[in-house]
Image: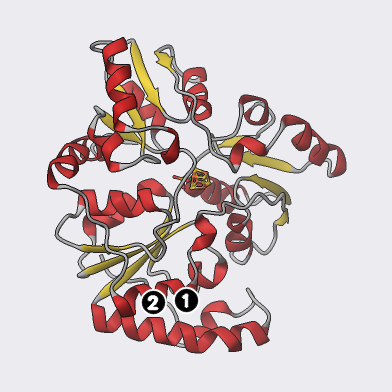
Amino acid sequence: MSPTSAPADPRKRLEGLLPDVEIAALAPLIEDIDEWKRRRNAVVLAHNYMTPDIYHGVADLRGDSLALARMAVEAEADVIVMAGVHFMAETAKIVNPAKTVLIPDTDAGCSLADAITGADVRLLKERYPGVPVVTYVNTSADVKAESDICCTSGNALQVVESLGVDRVIFLPDQYLGMWVASQTDIDVILYEGSCMVHERFTGDELRGYRALKPGVQIIAHPECPPDVLAEADFVGSTAGMIRWVQTERPKSVVMVTECSMADNVALESPDTEFVRPCNLCPHMKRITLEGIRDSLRDMRHEVVIPPDVADRARHAVERMLEVRI
Ligand code: 13P
Ligand code: SF4
């Protein structure tokens, strides 16, 4: 894997995205990050929910959770800085334990990861002996270690169907689980977790957008509740939603997901009007340019996972990466 060839001048990377005065103010900080990346032989992997200054200004590679996990496997740099939330950094460490993986803010968590512990999974396995556990990657390493296989929003259906069984336990996102259940004959046992960002959207809100803007296309992340997904013209992971906009080139679109997605995609899709409902993920927003600079300068905060937990979690993540989509 090699870093993408972003323009050398940080001002050019952000041209047209942010006001000129803001770009001028950010440029020295971005140059500083470029310099620290060189010194540390580091790459910055960024999730699609990062703000445009990070996404376009300092990320070497960008993607959804599945792409970030694959990028981490292939990373050649000595240091990976995860511009995303904690479970994404843990996943990078799990798949590439030889690397130093840094997360700029240890409080960048996830309401789904907080919803379940390894002990909860052990209880479920006692309750449903022999039923395989499919675990969304939005979980801690402890939870992954108790699981048979992981999945992301980009491959959940294919992962569930890859097992060749008639029943699975699906953790912890009830809405992603319901979405998978609606697409397959396999019996899906659900858990009660949800994403604090996506659970706030409602079908009524989406019908309101259609009434306001006839012809608008609505695309939604599968962490949304069923009444929201029922209104959507397309359902997919963050990367799937970006691809959909770039391929379908709708006249106007609502991306029913975290706010920064539309900001990041708008520049590359100038012919599309983005109607922007704004639900922020407070965890993703803890990652800032200053935090990334400090992380590289001070080599903090290093992700450390007990080897026995990492080994068991790796089995579940690698098994997922083998599933073709
Ligand atoms: P994606 O894998 O679709 O990018 O989703 C991750 C996430 O946290 C969505 O809220
Ligand atoms: Fe977790 Fe939801 Fe934030 Fe994604 S958007 S990191 S699922 S809280």
83, above or below 276, in the image: below
Q: Residue 219, percent across and down?
A: 63, 41
Which circle marks residue 290 in the picture? 1
Q: Residue 192, percent across and down?
A: 49, 25
Q: Is mark 2 on a helix, strand or loop?
A: helix
* Residue at numbered disc 2: 294
- Viewer-side residue, 143 vs 248: 143
Q: Residue 50, percent across and down?
A: 51, 61
The image quadrant of residue 188 is top left
Q: What residue type is labelled 1?
A: Glu
| Residue occupying the point 27% across, 22% down | 122
Say whether mark 1 is within 8 Å of ligand 2. Answer: no
- Crowding around mark 1 (Cα neighbors within 10 Å: few <14, some 14 to 19, many 20+) is some
295 sits to left or right of 55: left
54, above or below 199, in the image: below
| Residue occupying the point 35% across, 24% down | 160
- The quarter in which the N terminus is drawn is bottom left
Q: Which amino acid does label 2 sit on?
A: Asp
Q: What element carries label 1?
A: helix
| Residue occupying the point 42% across, 63% down | 105
- The quarter in which the C terminus is drawn is top left
| Residue occupying the point 22% across, 58% down | 74
56 sits to left or right of 131: right
- Crowding around mark 2 (Cα neighbors within 10 Å: few <14, some 14 to 19, many 20+) is some
How far apart are the two marked residues, 2 and 1, measured between alpha carbons?
Answer: 6 Å
Asked whether the beta carbons under mark 2 and mark 1 sit within 8 Å of each other, the answer is yes
Which circle marks residue 169 in the picture? none
- Viewer-side residue, 62 vs 304: 304
- Viewer-side residue, 47 vs 297: 297
